[in-house]
Amino acid sequence: MQQYATYIKPEWAPPAELFSPVWTVLYILIAISFGAVFLAVARKRLPTRILWPFVLNLFFNIIFTPIQFGLQSNLLASIDVILVVATLVWAMISIWQYSGFRWVAIVNIPYLLWGSFATVLQLTITFLNW
């Protein structure tokens, strides 16, 4: 994570201290909403195929930190964060068709907004540090 401090960042980049509390809140929302989807699939209230975007989103979300801070690859982190947002949009669209689970899409709007912001930030950092 020390490497992140050395990157050239846009002046609109939030302070590093903001990321932890924001992600803590988002991870709580993700755990509740994604957990409800996983539980509904286990109880046969939703089809198994609905899990694909949720599982992929978790996977891409989890590997971001090792890519960004372990491999220290801005390019791979940029690709990954785009996949995080893309799979989230896919998940939100997929779950919307199930009226009893539309709340899952709504609850994840803050995640989508932050993820979109994080994508623009990551792409900008990647460009500035090329």
Image (cartoon, rainbow, N blue to C red):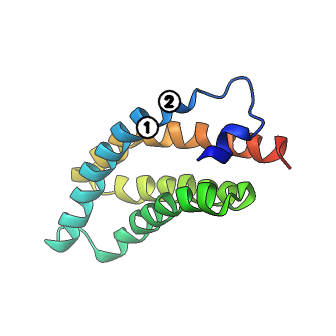
Q: CA distance from mark 1 to mark 2?
A: 6 Å
Q: Is residue 51 above or below residue 36?
A: below
Check disc 1 and give the amino acid type.
Answer: Ser
> Which image quarter: residue 13?
top right
> Which image quarter: residue 5?
top right
Check disc 2 and give the amino acid type.
Answer: Glu
Choose between 36 and 46: the one closer to the eye.
36
> Which image quarter: residue 115?
top right
Within 10 Å of disc 2 (Cα), the crowding (few <14, some 14-19, many 20+) is few
Q: Is residue 79 above or below residue 119?
A: below
- Residue 110, image x and y in percent? 43, 36
Choose between 106 and 21: the one closer to the eye.
21
Within 10 Å of disc 1 (Cα), the crowding (few <14, some 14-19, many 20+) is few
Question: Position of 47 compared to 125: left or right?
Answer: left
Label for residue 20? 1
Label for residue 17? 2
| Residue depicted at x 33% and y 40% | 107
Numbered disc 1: secondary structure:
helix
Numbered disc 2: secondary structure:
helix
Question: Position of 60 compared to 55: left or right?
Answer: right
Tally of numbered discs: 2
| Residue depicted at x 42% and y 62% | 58
| Residue depicted at x 41% and y 60% | 94
- Residue 109, image x and y in percent? 42, 39
* Tag 1–tag 2 contact (CB < 8 Å): yes
Q: Is residue 3 above or below residue 62?
A: above
- Residue 118, image x and y in percent? 59, 41
